[in-house]
Image (cartoon, rainbow, N blue to C red):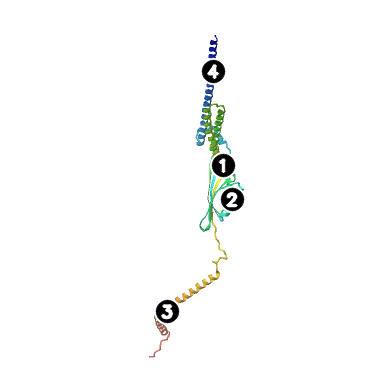
Amino acid sequence: MKSWIVIICSFLLAIVIGGCSNDSSEESQADKASYTSENDEVQEMEVETENKAELSTDNTEQTDAETKSQVTNMSDRMVIYTANLSIQVNSYTEAISSIQQELQTNNGYIVSTNSYSVEDELMEGTITVRIPQENFQEFLKTVESESTKVIDESINGQDVTEEYVDLESRLKSKQVVEKRLLEFMEKAEKTEDLLKISNDLAAVQEEIEQLKGRMNYLDNQVSLATITIHIQESKVNVPDLENNDLNTWNETKKQFMETLNFVIRAISSVIVFIVGSIPVLIVLGGILIVIWFILKRKRRQQEEPPENTEE
């Protein structure tokens, strides 16, 4: 009788233990299935959001309505301004000093500078600065007004409003995924599940950091305009009145000697002409004398009255 009681108790105990293990296994499988289904749902939501962001960036007709309304309703556009300016100045050093003072006044700073010497000991150089966008136009006008000549000027603007809105949308979706994964990590009991969730969480957090980095970069580029200024120095060298080249006495003696030499050369030329031409002058003089006598004799004959003869 006792043996039968022991057998029946053992059988009932086995049934109870088997039921508990099955319940535990089913619960674990249910948790795993729940994580898998939730994870799939999150990934689908993430893919859908990213697709909408890409469509918004391309400006197609299938743009997400919510993202499009955000871009349209923004009162301030996000524009990255860059400018290139080439000027001439009287003094390169003074121009650089003036730009530095303007930067301090307008809360700007120098990114890079490069200067070098050209012909006639003149200076040239390039300076790249960053200035708050609200002071961008005023700074350019000040630099132009202090130069002697504006050689070239170009201003470019890049609108990044839609890209920034797309990044915000993608960041929100990634943060939702991160929150879900953190919840799953708190509920997970198996090491395998923890490793899987940890890997997924690390990948999502890396993408979040990349999105935040790009957004911070755009914020910085929009808030501060970049200006590259090429400066050319153009001086007019005026000689000093006390310069040794301005020697009045030496210049006077030089001019006197040049005048005297000219007179001497002129007299010498006349003498050479007269002496060299004497034979010709003698012949011409003789011919002129003969002609003069002939003409004088004819004139006398014409002036004498005719003699009266008596028949």
Task: Give the alpha-carbon distance from disc 3 to disc 1, as whole Å.
Answer: 97 Å
Please state which of the two labelled residues, at mark 4 or mark 2, is closer to the viewer: 4
Q: Which residue occupies the extreme front position in the image?
A: 2
Task: Give the alpha-carbon distance from disc 1 to disc 4, as whole Å.
Answer: 65 Å
Task: Give the alpha-carbon distance from disc 4 to disc 3, as whole Å.
Answer: 157 Å
Which callout, 4 or 2, points at the residue further toward the start of the chain?
4
Which callout, 3 or 2, points at the residue further toward the start of the chain?
2
Q: Are marks 2 and 1 in contact (CB under 8 Å)?
A: no
Q: Position of residue 220 (x, y in %)?
A: 56, 42
> Would you name the residue on which mark 3 appears?
275
Which callout, 1 or 4, points at the residue further toward the start of the chain?
4
> Would you name the residue on which mark 2 appears?
100
Where disc 3 sits, the SS reads helix
Q: Amino acid at mark 2?
A: Gln
Q: Which residue occupies the extreme bottom position in the image?
A: 310
> Would you name the residue on which mark 4 appears?
17
Q: Amino acid at mark 3?
A: Val
Out of 183 and 24, give the one closest to the viewer. Answer: 24
Which residue appears at 57% of the width and 54% of the height?
93
